[in-house]
Image (tube, helix red, strand yellow):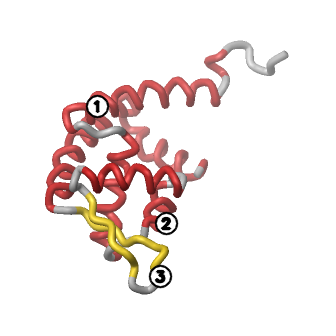
Amino acid sequence: MTRFSGPDESPGFLLWRVTLAWQRAMRAALAPHDLTHVQFVLLASLWWLENHSGAPSQQRLAEHAGTDPMMTSQVLRKLADRSLVSRSVDPADSRARLLSLTSGGKALVAKAMKDVEDADQAYFAGLGGERREFLRSLTRLL
């Protein structure tokens, strides 16, 4: 039936449980900012890309964040409706949209980032000195 003597030996099952617990911590950190985790990831990724390579396209943002392009577009429309993101037509390709954070988006990302990083710090504190190796392992899996 299974090669494992119990669920605590299954890396997939443990990853599932860890992911659920971490997502709960992220939801709690983001609730005061009225952001979903996907909204935050897209805003933070947009912030990162803007600061390192200029205004990205929606496609570039989706690639960077690892999100589905259609879902990314839907979430960005909602963020634009909240005046957090500006979407403009790319002069080089009228089908593409270039993105930028509004001043309100930048302010919200700054506040939410602090809370998310604090939540991450608290959640992953249990790794102690093994944090770097954990990050290397996650990177290898990607």
Element at label 2: helix
Element at label 1: helix
Q: Position of residue 87 (x, y in %)?
A: 33, 66
- The quadrant holding residue 85 is bottom left
Near mark 3 (Cα within 10 A), the count class, few <14, some 14-19 or many ≥20, is: few
Give the mark, 2 or 3, whose residue is nearer the N terminus.
2
On residue 59, which mark appears? 2
On residue 122, which mark appears? 1
Q: Position of residue 115 (x, y in %)?
A: 22, 39
Element at label 3: strand
Check disc 3 and give the amino acid type: Asp
- The quadrant holding residue 100 is bottom left
In this rendering, would 125 be left or right of 59? Answer: left
Mark 2 touches mark 3? (CB < 8 Å) = no
Near mark 1 (Cα within 10 A), the count class, few <14, some 14-19 or many ≥20, is: few
Mark 2 touches mark 1? (CB < 8 Å) = no
Give the mark, 3 or 1, whose residue is nearer the N terminus.
3
Spatial CA distance of label 2 from label 1 is 33 Å
The residue located at (52%, 54%) in the rendering is 70
In this rendering, would 126 be left or right of 117? Answer: right
- Residue beneath label 3, please? 93
Check disc 1 and give the amino acid type: Ala
Give the number of the mark in front: 3 or 1.
Answer: 3
Spatial CA distance of label 2 from label 3 is 12 Å
- Direction top: furthest residue: 6
Check disc 2 and give the amino acid type: Gln
- The quadrant holding residue 1 is top right
Q: Is residue 50 above or below residue 142?
A: below
